[in-house]
Image (spheres, grey):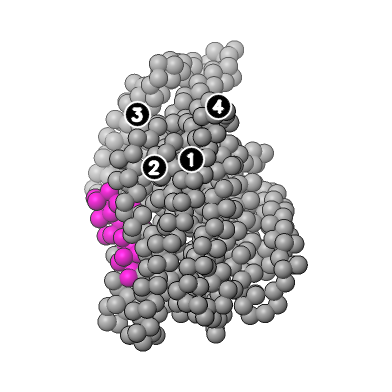
């Protein structure tokens, strides 16, 4: 019961911190991590012991699937070069660089342990990165590059981590390393695609909203668990699974299922973010309590050096890559996948370089180290220092940095929405041709007005019909509430009509 009470208190505190973050214009994960660290040093603070496999499955799988479902495969293809440079080269450089720094700080640390530390802190986390990016909203191309990185970089880092841990405990073979990488990557893609195609008929046959949502979550965790049981990458499998499901068009989800599904997923991802970033802070206390005062001082200073190395290596690589691309564009001309994309700039490169927040994957990987692993306490402390440090230093300064830099407004979404809206309205009008019924005439007039507004560059929601709809819905809600208050109708009738007004209001939402 005490654990449940603490969870309720943490959720309530997270709501307060989130409200404070919105008022300050700061990303809420940074405040949540600071709040968790503060709670860790309170008398009687909770000590949550979660299995590392459970942490990954519980916090990473659903949030990663949600991000993969919303990701744009077209934009990922358009930006595959910078994404690949971040996913493969940046992760490798960070792993090697941190390992070298760790060996300089602790010459007795075995190389496998140093590489494991580098792999633990190498990947910017999907939970952290996307939670912060949704607050600051950088230019469209930068956002898509960072989203693509956050979806894929965990896989490369965790593969290196797995090999390093195996080497430290025995059984590592360089001959088997490359085939292991290839087998895991290819196998994860195949399993993700296969499970997505197998899931399609199941999702298409479920017409009950609660059942559909439950199946969505069960299948998400099931995909992750199956991938881990097969020795594959849960990250790659979930990403491929989510991207494939999002592009299914033969079995589209009905609106009455999609609206509550999206609402539940949004709420769940927020709750998971709250718990994840709070738990990060709560782990600091137990680690520091297990160290002597001398070890604590040495480890804290070394962890600060590791944090600086992680931030510095990313900035050095991203700006070097950005400079090389801009020089290539200057000498040979700019070649972009589509004309709406903005070419790389130094300001954009700096934003990408500064978006290196670490999160739950780093925490889970550190906690997953087996007992007796060389320098296990320091690796865990360094991992938590990097997570907290990057969230606070980079997370709190990211929005002001974007405001100061001259960044192009390259967001093509509004233009594409105008194009799609005009095309769909034309299709609607074409479908009504030849139908002279009063209902068809009313729809023809409404869609015609909406098409005119779209061509003028105005939102179709601004039409007089929609303005009137919003007015009558507001009056209807007040009348309905008065009827229930006077006892003339019961809650069943009230809820049924309330749902009808909700759909009417959604159809005329601004």
3D distance between C-alphas at marks 2 and 4: 29 Å
Per the image, the residue denoted by label 2 is: 137
3D distance between C-alphas at marks 1 and 2: 23 Å
Circle number at residue 323: 1
Note whether 414 is above or below 398 in the view shown: above
Label 1–label 3 contact, CB within 8 A: no
Looking at the rendered image, the disc whose residue lies closer to the viewer, 3 or 2, is 2
Q: Quadrant of the C terminus?
A: top left
Per the image, the residue denoted by label 3 is: 469
Circle number at residue 333: 4
Neighbour class for label 1 at 10 Å: few (<14), some, many (≥20)?
some
Residue drawn at 64 percent across, 42 percent down: 248
Name the residue furthest bottom: 292
Label 1–label 4 contact, CB within 8 A: no
* Front residue (pair 138, 87): 87
3D distance between C-alphas at marks 1 and 4: 14 Å
Question: Would residue 231 be found to the left or right of residue 302 on screen?
Answer: right
Question: Would residue 360 be found to the left or right of residue 29 on screen?
Answer: right
- The answer to which of marks 3 and 4 sits earlier in the sequence is 4
**Magenta stretch containing residue 111, yes or no?**
no
Neighbour class for label 3 at 10 Å: few (<14), some, many (≥20)?
some
């Amino acid at each position: 019961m005490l654990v449940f009470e603490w969870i309720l208190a943490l959720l309530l505190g997270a709501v307060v911190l989130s409200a404070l973050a919105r008022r300050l214009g700061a990303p809420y994960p940074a405040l949540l991590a600071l709040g968790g660290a503060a709670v860790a040093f309170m008398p009687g603070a909770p000590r949550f012991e979660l299995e590392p496999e459970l942490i990954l499955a519980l916090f990473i799988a659903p949030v990663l699937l949600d991000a993969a479902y919303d990701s744009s495969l077209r934009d990922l293809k358009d930006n595959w070069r910078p994404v690949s440079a971040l996913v493969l080269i940046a992760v490798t450089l960070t792993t090697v660089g941190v390992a070298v720094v760790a060996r300089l700080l602790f010459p007795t640390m075995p190389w496998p342990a140093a590489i494991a530390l580098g792999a633990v802190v190498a990947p910017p986390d999907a939970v952290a990165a996307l939670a912060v990016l949704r607050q600051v909203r950088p230019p469209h191309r930068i956002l898509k590059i960072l989203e693509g990185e956050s979806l894929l970089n965990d896989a490369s880092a965790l593969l290196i981590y797995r090999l390093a841990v195996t080497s430290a405990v025995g059984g590592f073979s360089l001959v088997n390393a490359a085939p292991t990488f290839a087998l895991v990557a290819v196998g994860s893609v195949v399993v993700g695609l296969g499970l997505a195609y197998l899931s399609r008929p199941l999702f298409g046959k479920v017409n009950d909203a609660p059942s559909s949502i439950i199946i969505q979550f069960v299948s998400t965790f099931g995909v992750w668990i199956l991938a881990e049981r097969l020795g594959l990458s849960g990250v790659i499998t979930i990403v491929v699974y989510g991207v494939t499901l999002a592009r299914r068009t033969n079995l589209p989800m009905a609106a009455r299922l999609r609206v509550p599904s999206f609402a539940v997923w949004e709420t769940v991802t927020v709750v998971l973010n709250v718990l994840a970033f709070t738990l990060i802070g709560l782990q600091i206390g137990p680690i520091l309590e297990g160290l002597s005062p001398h070890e604590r001082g040495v480890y804290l200073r070394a962890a600060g050096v590791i944090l600086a190395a992680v931030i510095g290596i990313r900035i050095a690589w991203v700006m070097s890559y950005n400079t090389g691309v801009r020089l290539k564009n200057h000498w040979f001309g700019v070649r972009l996948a589509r004309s709406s994309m903005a070419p790389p700039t130094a300001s954009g490169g700096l934003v990408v370089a500064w978006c290196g927040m670490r999160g739950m994957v780093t925490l889970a990987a550190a906690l997953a180290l087996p007992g007796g692993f060389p320098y296990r306490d320091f690796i865990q402390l360094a991992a938590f220092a990097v997570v907290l440090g990057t969230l606070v230093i980079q997370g709190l300064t990211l929005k002001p940095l974007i405001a100061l830099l001259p960044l192009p407004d390259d967001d093509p979404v509004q233009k594409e929405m105008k194009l799609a809206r005009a095309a769909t309205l034309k299709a609607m009008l074409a479908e009504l041709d030849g139908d002279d019924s009063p209902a068809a005439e009313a729809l023809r007039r409404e869609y015609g007005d909406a098409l005119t507004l779209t061509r003028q560059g105005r939102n179709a929601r601004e039409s007089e019909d929609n303005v009137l709809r919003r007015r009558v819905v507001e009056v209807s809600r007040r009348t309905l509430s008065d009827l229930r208050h006077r006892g003339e109708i019961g809650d069943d009738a009230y809820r049924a009509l309330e749902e009808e007004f909700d759909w009417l209001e959604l159809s005329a939402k601004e």
